[in-house]
Image (cartoon, helix red, strand yellow):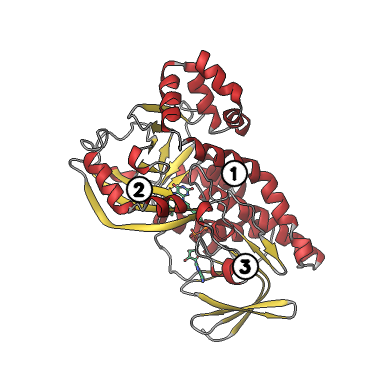
Amino acid sequence: MSAEINTDILIIGAGPAGAGTALFLAKQGISCVLTDKATFPRDKVCGDALSGKVVEVLKKLDPSYLEELNAHKKFLGSWGVTFVSPNGESLRVPFGKREAQSSSPGFITKRLDFDQWLFQKAKNHPLITTYESAEIRSYERAGEHIIAHSKDGAAFRTRLVIACDGAYSSFAKNIAGIKTEAAHNCFGLRAYYSGVSGLDSANFIELHFIKDVLPGYLWIFPLPNGEANVGIGMRADKLNKKKINLKKALEKAIRENNVLRERFSRAELLGEVKLFGLPLGSLKRKLSGDNYMLCGDAAQLIDPFTGEGIGNALMSGHYAAIQAARCLKSNNFSEQFIQQYDQELYQRLWSEFQLSYRLQQLVNFPSLFNFVVRKANSNKALQETISCMFEDMDMRARLKTPAFYFKLLFS
Ligand SMILES: Cc1cc2nc3c(=O)[nH]c(=O)nc-3n(C[C@H](O)[C@H](O)[C@H](O)COP(=O)(O)OP(=O)(O)OC[C@H]3O[C@@H](n4cnc5c(N)ncnc54)[C@H](O)[C@@H]3O)c2cc1C
């Protein structure tokens, strides 16, 4: 490639944020160029869990997508989550009260397959021009435009960059001036296993709050073909302070933990164990400026408690596409005009991030965590409250109030 490519909208990165933004633009009849440094299908280190929020945004894109996911053999429907507290007691929480419905509230699928599925939707759309193996190495401002230069010499001239280039976004760092701070960043390690025993019959995802890795957690997410995504994550500042080696911590937990030892006794590690960053949404950032917006991990939108980022990546793509349409209509790509994107996105997400940040701190108190799990196991109403919290943010807000713990103690 060596020519100059002109486009009103250039999306850098074709993961969920980038492919989602392109599809939301196309839905409004707007064309764009979508570039990625990788060639699809490509892997992305992740827990591979698609939450209810992913389902909600995909439905907005096209309701038929959900039928496709339900019928796709590489997507496994998941109906809930099991928490295992530091003392080994477990609490099984269905997502809402929908266990009887035909479509599952969430899915688990390897990112290799999910991102390929979504990218193909974009690639096949006549309004979206895709470039794979097109790594953007530098950016230059030219009057009303930004020119993005790729590794192999192509130049993309655009009025609007939508940066979806992930957790290590060079656009966010070099053009938007956003730093990653250890207290608002996490590292996660992902491994694939076969032969893990005791996986849930309704494919509940499992979060294990093991003493040695607090305030982080270990996860086991069942996958199609009887495999499992197994990983461990912790906030970067805590990792540094405690000098924890995540790989060793994962191996030790699997070897020695009372709950896990037996379940992994015949398990086999498949491929490499890989590490990647999770930029958390617990700090408000400036997500736009003259001629640009940031989406997904480039905008640091991962839930500070659950570590979910795919739903927020897709959701930010939806808001960015709405703002991009306004920019084109008013022929205005100025910082002042585009900042409506930040306002609308944070209006939707900020209270969620604040609550999740509080929940993240609950894990710093293992005995309180043990207590809530024990109590919930003997109290149906509390179980339902926790279950509803996964769907209803007002319910989740109850965890912030002293009255919740008072009732818990004396109920
Ligand atoms: C260990 C771990 C576990 C996780 N578990 C979950 C989970 O279970 N559920 C969940 O919802 N979230 C999870 N997340 C978070 C989730 O993976 C991210 O939030 C999600 O991938 C964000 O999507 P994105 O499109 O913003 O970025 P990405 O998926 O990272 O996509 C970015 C794209 O940009 C491309 N790119 C990068 N630089 C350039 C460049 N210079 N030029 C061109 N292209 C470029 C990359 O090739 C990539 O395709 C996890 C993350 C980690 C690390």
Assess disc 3: are there few (<14), some (14-19) or many (≥20) residues with their C-alpha within 10 Å of its C-alpha: few
| Location of residue 196 by image quarter | top left
Q: Residue at x 71, y 50 (%)?
A: 344
Q: Residue at x 34, y 58 (%)?
A: 274
Q: Nearer the viewer, residue 10 or 390?
A: 390
Indicate left or right for 23 with 365 as reference: right
Instruction: Describe the element under mark 2 as helix, strand or loop.
Output: strand
| Location of residue 401 by image quarter | top right
Task: Point out the tag, 2 or 1, that comes first from the N-terminus.
Answer: 2
Q: Residue at x 35, y 51 (%)?
A: 244
Residue 294 visible within the image: yes
Q: Which residue is mark 1?
A: 353
Give the label on residue 259, or none. none
In percent of width and height, residue 400 lies at 59, 31
In percent of width and height, residue 332 lies at 79, 67
| Location of residue 295 by image quarter | bottom right
At label 2, the amino acid type is Gly
Task: Point out the tag, 1 or 3, that comes first from the N-terminus.
Answer: 3
In percent of width and height, residue 97 lies at 51, 25
Instruction: Describe the element under mark 3 as helix, strand or loop.
Output: loop
Q: Is residue 95 above or below residue 264?
A: above
Q: Which residue is mark 2?
A: 231
At label 1, the amino acid type is Phe
Q: Which residue is mark 3?
A: 177
- Kindly tell me whether mark 2's CB lies below 8 Å from ligand 1: yes
Indicate left or right for 253 with 300 as reference: left
Q: Is residue 383 above or below residue 335?
A: above
Instruction: Describe the element under mark 1 as helix, strand or loop.
Output: helix
Q: CA distance from mark 1 to mark 3?
A: 22 Å
Q: How many marks?
A: 3
